[in-house]
């Protein structure tokens, strides 16, 4: 990518990252509940409010436009005190950031199942090691083509539009960064070809309690989007309000 292209890409990334005055589909979580609930290895999905967020949500037909990996507080002596997340930003590239950046946005916690503390550390460190990498500006160009104006792209083709990118290992987008971190321990996210189970083959018409697929063919990390962590069968959806002891008896209803 030559100097002119990089300059245009930087300008475009800055323009697309500008915030818009739009309402989210749900209110943000209580920040204290969110902070108390997150664990290293959790994926925090974000309903963004920028121009580029609108393009991603349209193309993926999803609420979620951004993803960050929770790596824990004080993960490095060089990191600011309140930084606990690693993500890929269009302007600043792969960086560490704090929860305050997403405090006013609708979020969702996706938690991988069955990871040991050591495996969570490996996933977190894989993302931390990429801090300083550049954002894949090729992806920004591709998004911009379908944003001005938003085109009538058939649903079945929209997600394919996000599979484009430079392929440069020193560049990343938010979902690619996190997917590669989980690949470091061979943790599944989404299969390339979902397989159905033939219930008629089971004479009792039910699946074995401990049924597990024998083989997993992963979708390439460059094809993954924030939405995939939400719909993945291998991540639990964690709701901070519930985790922090929600009791409907304490609600005061206002007529």
Image (cartoon, grey):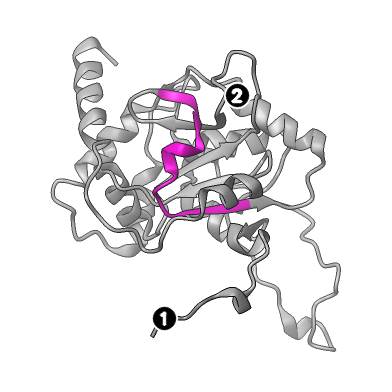
Residue 149 x/y as whole percent: 13, 50
Look at the image and give the residue range highlighted in magenta. 93-110
Please tell me which residue is depicted at 57% across the width and 23% down the height of the picture: 81
For disc 1, the marked residue is: 254
Q: Residue furthest left?
A: 149
Label for residue 165? none
Q: Which quadrant would residue 167 be assigned to in this image?
A: top left
Please tell me which residue is depicted at 64% across the width and 30% down the height of the picture: 73
Identify which residue, 137 or 122, lies in the foreground. 122
Q: Which quadrant would residue 61 be assigned to in this image?
A: bottom left
Name the side, left or right, on which 229 lies relative to 120.
left
Say if residue 217 shows up in the picture: no
Dot 1 or dot 2: first in sequence order is 2
Residue 147 vertical position relative to residue 83 in the rendered view, above or below: below
Secondary structure under tag 2 reads: helix
- Between circles 1 and 2, the one closer to the viewer is 1
Screen quadrant of the N terminus: top left
Dot 1, how many residues are within 10 Å of its Cα: few (below 14), some (14-19), or many (20+)? Answer: few
Residue 227 x/y as whole percent: 47, 54
Dot 2, how many residues are within 10 Å of its Cα: few (below 14), some (14-19), or many (20+)? Answer: many
Q: For the image shown, how many numbered marks are present on the structure?
A: 2
For disc 2, the marked residue is: 128
Say if residue 253 shows up in the picture: yes
Q: Residue furthest top?
A: 3
Q: CA distance from mark 1 to mark 2?
A: 46 Å
Residue 10 x/y as whole percent: 25, 22
Secondary structure under tag 1 reads: loop
Residue 157 vertical position relative to residue 52 in the rendered view, above or below: below
Residue 69 among magenta residues: no
Please tell me which residue is depicted at 38% across the width and 27% down the height of the picture: 136
């Amino acid at each position: 990518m030559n100097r002119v292209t990089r300059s245009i890409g930087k300008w475009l990334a800055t323009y697309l990252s500008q915030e818009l005055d739009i309402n989210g589909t749900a209110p943000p979580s209580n920040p204290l509940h969110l902070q108390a609930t997150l664990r290293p290895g959790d994926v925090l999905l974000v309903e963004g409010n920028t121009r580029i967020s609108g393009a991603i949500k349209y193309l993926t037909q999803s609420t979620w436009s951004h993803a960050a990996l929770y790596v824990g507080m004080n993960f490095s002596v060089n990191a600011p005190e309140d930084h606990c997340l690693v993500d890929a930003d269009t302007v600043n590239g792969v960086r560490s950031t704090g929860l305050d950046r997403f405090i006013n946005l609708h979020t969702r916690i996706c938690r991988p199942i069955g990871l040991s503390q050591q495996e969570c550390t490996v996933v977190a460190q894989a993302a931390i090691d990429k801090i300083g990498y550049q954002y894949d500006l090729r992806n920004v160009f591709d998004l911009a083509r379908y944003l001005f104006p938003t085109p009538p792209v058939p649903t079945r083709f929209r997600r394919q539009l996000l599979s484009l990118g430079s392929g440069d290992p020193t560049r990343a987008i938010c979902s690619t960064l996190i997917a590669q971190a989980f690949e470091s321990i061979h943790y599944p996210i989404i299969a390339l070809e979902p397989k159905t189970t033939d219930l008629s083959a089971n004479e009792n018409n039910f699946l074995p309690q401990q049924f597990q697929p024998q083989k997993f063919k992963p979708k390439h990390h460059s094809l993954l989007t924030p939405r995939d962590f939400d719909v993945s069968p291998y991540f639990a959806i964690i709701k901070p309000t519930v985790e922090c002891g929600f009791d409907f008896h304490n609600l005061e209803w206002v007529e």
